[in-house]
Amino acid sequence: MDALTLARLQFAITTVYHFFFVPLTLGLSILVALMQTAYVRSGDETYKQMAKFWGKLFVINFAMGVVTGIVQEFQFGMNWSEYARFMGDIFGAPLAVEALLAFFLESVFLGVWIFGWDRLPKRVHLGSIWAVAIGSNLSALWILVANSFMQQPAGYAIENGRALMTDFGALLTNPNVWVQYPHVLTSGMTTAAMFVLGISAWHLLRKQGDYQELFRRSFRWAAVYGVIGTLAVMLVGHSQMQHMVRVQPMKVAAAEGLFESENPAGLSLLTIGSLDQQSEVFSIRIPYLLSLLSYNSLEGEVKGIRDLQAEYEATYGAGRNYTPSIVLNYWSFRAMVGAGILMFLLAAFALWKVYKNNFESSNRLLKLLPFAILLPYLATATGWLLTELGRQPWIVFGLLRVEDAASPNVTTGMVLFSLIAFTAIYAVLMAADIFLLRYFARQPQHVFASEDVEAANPEMAF
């Protein structure tokens, strides 16, 4: 592999590692805040236990997310210096706001929340966890403001080969932000719901310990949260796809393996053939469905890869390939959608069992849900692959190609060394995160024992 390919692989690996932690942070922060709100309003100690237990797992996940996120910014200067030079004036502003406002907000108030149990007035302490939840989700917003410029540039001018920001408001009102951010937010809710459902189901199945009511009530909350999250993520995902049809039609065509323009267009259930070579393939398609999803109408043209390649050559220059990897985009899209549908069905069935008040006796469901914790991670990882790979060959759509964004003086050996080092370090961090989450999730008594120790000795806490 050459240095460019290795640099792309390195950024992909570090991004996917980092994004394993982000959705759970986003969704679980809100859920813990809601649980503590219920405690403050009712005085019910079970709600306090719920907030403490799930809050402990949130803190573990948050700490790992911070560590893995720092490395990503290093790579802009290490492997992607030309990108940093081109985008620095624009990319730097939302990243600075994210660090100075959102990240500091969540970090400071997380410390207040950890050490403030039984020290601060209940409502003040409750305000600290809501500040954490708001800060976490604001942090994601600012990152997506930066990413949305890469998807759909807005509020800029090109001067001396650099993109300069001319309108900060245009960055904030970029239409891509307001279809992408809700999708990330609701995917976080879904991740947290499946996480809580899976762990609660594991405990309910064993019917042992002193915390069964904690997990009964957590199961009920997570079932409601999961149905809301999965429904919302599908609805905003639908809006995001309609937006992509307008601004990045090649991404949609690649995700569908659609070589020829169609009107009306059918949705591919399965395509067999040599996709990346754009050969004739066998497809099983549902007639009209792609047009319906794209335009809310049974009619509407969805452009194919060959027509779009010709259009892009006319616009951006002939003799270059403007088609992303069809195989990766096609299967990433199906993995994301398939996992999303499965999560909705599981959450809806769990909620139905809650409504019928027989979820504790549904052994098959309880045995299945712990494995379902993996589904949101599959969906979010493949969703990001689709988001980023579907934009190729552009790193900033229509303005800067990936091959022109890499650092010119970085050798293959340098990138290979850092790739191996980062992957190994991240693997250790991931193993530590899984170990800690598993340890405390399986033994809630240790969560509350550690909370008591931390209350008496604040210097021993995280």
Image (cartoon, helix red, strand yellow):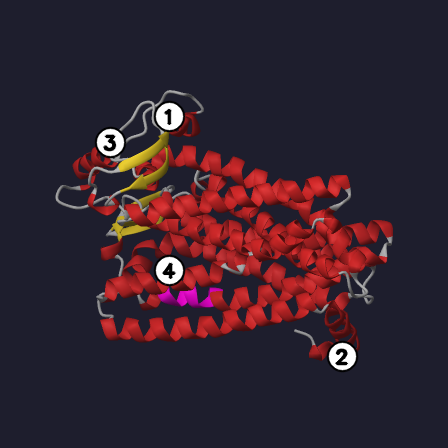
- Of circles 2 and 3, which is in front? 3
Marks 4 and 3: CB-CB under 8 Å? no
Q: CA distance from mark 3 to mark 1?
A: 15 Å
Q: Vertically, is 85 above or below 319?
A: below
Between residues 231 and 387, which one lies in front from this camera angle? 231
Quarter assignment of residue 317: top left
Badge 1: residue crowd in 10 Å (few <14, some 14–19, many ≥20): some
Residue hosting label 2:
457
- Of circles 2 and 4, which is in front? 4
Residue hosting label 3:
260
Dot 4 or dot 1, earlier in sequence: 4
Q: Specify the quadrant that holds the C terminus.
A: bottom right
Q: Is residue 203 left or right of residue 272?
A: right
Badge 2: residue crowd in 10 Å (few <14, some 14–19, many ≥20): few
Q: CA distance from mark 1 to mark 2?
A: 65 Å
Q: Amino acid at mark 2?
A: Asn
Dot 3 or dot 1, earlier in sequence: 3
Q: Is residue 393 left or right of residue 363?
A: left
Q: Amino acid at mark 4?
A: Ala
Q: CA distance from mark 2 to mark 3?
A: 67 Å
